[in-house]
Image (cartoon, rainbow, N blue to C red):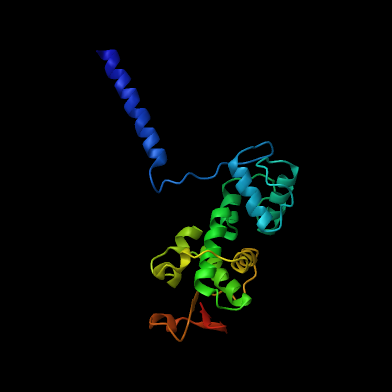
Amino acid sequence: MLHQQKRITVMLLAFLAVAILVMPGTAMAAPDLQVGSKNGDVWDLQYRLQILGYYQGKLDGVYGSRTYQAVKQFQRNYGLAADGLTGKRTWNVLKKVSVNRAEMQMLAQLVYGEARGESYVGQVAVAAVVMNRLQSDRFPNTLKEVIFEPYAFTAIDDGQYWLTPDKTAYQAALDAVRGWDPTGNALYYFNPDTATSAWIWTRPQIKKIGSHIFAR
């Protein structure tokens, strides 16, 4: 009987551990990576570095010399210790200035839903606002949370976010992630002909691009 009780206790503890790992909202931090690491996190690292122009090799999930050198160059440019290791600090900065593949898709969808009728510069500007929010302490910490923050973007509210983006939207998203910001560090934009919020008019305006006014 005692043996059976111990067995049940062990099973319950194991079940609890698994439940905690898969519980919604408990995202696990990316692990430390170094030369020799081989996993999906390395693939994600390579993708982000490739988008930013640091990594030129094949996305293979293997932390080799090219990945090592790309990480070191990224670290130098962002004031990090250039040791070629991808630890917590490097991940934190990288995730503020880049996107993974799923986030690139989300950003392109937002651009298409919000600004497909705008000029190319106007589309890049919309994506740049999202990236500026991602890097700001005044907004959520992940691109998904930025995009889906309640009432942040009209395309989410009216469903146009779910339209299939075209190549232009993807390119505009890519250019914004790579650092092109036609807005001058704007955190907001609005269409003066359709805006219904009195608050948005109180924001310091930077410039007008197409039908959108961009503001801080």
Q: Nearer the viewer, residue 90 or 127?
A: 127
Q: Nearer the viewer, residue 86 or 39?
A: 39
Task: Locate the N terminus by quadrant.
Answer: top left
- Rendered location of residue 147, percent (x, y): 47, 64
Q: At x 26% / y 14%, what residue is drawn?
A: 2
Q: At x 50% / y 60%, what residue is drawn?
A: 143
- Rendered location of residue 65, percent (x, y): 75, 43
In the rendered image, is residue 187 in sight? Answer: no
Q: Nearer the viewer, residue 59 or 81?
A: 59
53 relative position to 205: left or right = right
Residue 52 higher or lower than 2, as above or below:
below
In the rendered image, is residue 164 in sight? Answer: yes
Residue 23: quarter of image: top left
Q: Residue furthest left?
A: 1
- Rendered location of residue 141, percent (x, y): 48, 58
Q: At x 43% / y 70%, what residue is drawn?
A: 152
- Rendered location of residue 100, percent (x, y): 58, 54
Residue 204 higher or lower than 46, as above or below:
below
Residue 165 higher or lower than 123, as above or below:
above
Q: Residue furthest bottom?
A: 193
27 relative position to 8: left or right = right
Q: At x 66% / y 40%, what residue is drawn?
A: 34
84 relative position to 209: left or right = right
Residue 107: quarter of image: bottom right
Residue 185 higher or lower than 60, as above or below:
below
Q: How many marks?
A: 0
Q: Nearer the viewer, residue 119 or 124?
A: 119
